[in-house]
Every structure is written in C-alpha cells, then in structure tokens.
Image: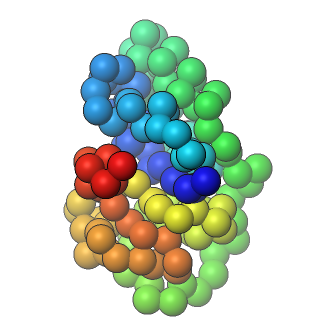
C-alpha cells in the first residue's frame, strides 16, 4: 500500500471542487492518505464556506492523521522551506509517506519530482497521471 501525505492545499482543492480529478485521490486503490494536525488546521482555515467545510470534514474522516506534530530535525538534502511549510515535510517524513502531494509550487517547487528525506514530492496532477 502506497502512503501519500497531503498538503493543506490538496485538501482545500478537493473540498472546493468535489467532482475534480484531485478528489479522485480518495478512491484510489492501494493508497493510504495521510495528514498532520498542522495540515488539517491550515485546510480548515482556508475553507470557510459551510458546504465546502462539510465536504472537507468528510475528506478528513478518510485520512490517517498523525497524533501530533513531529519535533524539528535535520533533513538530508534540506530544500530550505519557509517555517510555515517545514512542518508539512517533517510530518510527511515521520509518517513514513512514500509521496508528499502539494500544489505549492512557490515553496516546494525546488524539490518537485525529487525525494527529500525519503519522500517523493509531487504535484497532485503528476501523481494522478502515474496511477
């Protein structure tokens, strides 16, 4: 089973666009979707509309969520993420994820398509094309 860690922007996109390709992540066979409390808090802040918030909570219910945020640690090949994005990568590594999906090209762009700390960082569309 492939372990796929989701950044908040992936959750937000799926909640706002329930019929989109990104929402199909939840129906992929042999994939376990993961997140962290930090990611969930950010997603919830960015989905204020009641109908989308209800969809977000349904999506969250299908995730495996880390019980707590990991402590900071040195990452081999550290991409130098800003402080607000570093917890996402740290949680993906600690969770044992195979893949981290993010739409954040601004901050994760330098490591897209590569493995950082043993986790491949991909755009959701790129990941879905390979499935």
Task: Name the residue nearer the viewer: 121 or 91.
Answer: 121
What residue sits 32% from the left and 47% below the top? 128
Please identify the residue farthest to the right as the structure is shown: 67
Task: Name the residue nearer the viewer: 41 or 95.
Answer: 95
Q: How is the image coloured?
A: rainbow
The answer to whether 122 is drawn above or below residue 21 in the figure is below
For the question of whether residue 72 can be seen, the reply is yes
- Across the whole image, how many numbered discs are drawn on residues? 0
Instruction: Answer left or right for 92 relative to 23.
Output: right
For the question of whether residue 103 can be seen, the reply is no
Quadrant for residue 25, please give it: top left
Residue 84 in percent (x, y) is at 45, 61
Instruction: Answer left or right for 45 relative to 74.
Output: left
What residue sits 49% from the left and 33% below the top? 26
Quadrant for residue 102, please give it: bottom left
What residue sits 51% from the left and 15% below the top? 54
What residue sits 61% from the left and 53% below the top? 1
Instruction: Answer left or right for 61 relative to 7.
Output: right
The answer to whether 106 is drawn above or below residue 37 in the figure is below
The answer to whether 47 is drawn above or below residue 74 in the figure is above
Residue 35 in percent (x, y) is at 58, 48
Residue 107 in percent (x, y) is at 30, 65
Quadrant for residue 3, please give it: bottom right
The answer to whether 103 is drawn above or below residue 17 in the figure is below
Task: Name the residue nearer the viewer: 47 or 20.
Answer: 20
Residue 103 in percent (x, y) is at 29, 51
């Amino acid at each position: 089973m492939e372990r796929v860690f989701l950044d908040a922007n992936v959750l937000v996109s799926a909640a706002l666009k329930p019929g989109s390709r990104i929402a199909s992540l939840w129906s992929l066979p042999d994939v376990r979707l993961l997140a962290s409390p930090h990611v969930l808090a950010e997603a919830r802040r960015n989905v204020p509309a009641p109908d989308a918030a209800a969809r977000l909570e349904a999506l969250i219910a299908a995730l495996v969520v880390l019980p707590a945020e990991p402590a900071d640690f040195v990452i081999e090949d550290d991409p130098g993420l800003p402080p607000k994005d570093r917890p996402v990568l740290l949680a993906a590594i600690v969770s044992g994820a195979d893949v981290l999906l993010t739409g954040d090209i601004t901050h994760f762009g330098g490591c897209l398509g590569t493995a950082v700390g043993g986790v491949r960082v991909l755009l959701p569309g790129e990941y879905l094309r390979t499935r």
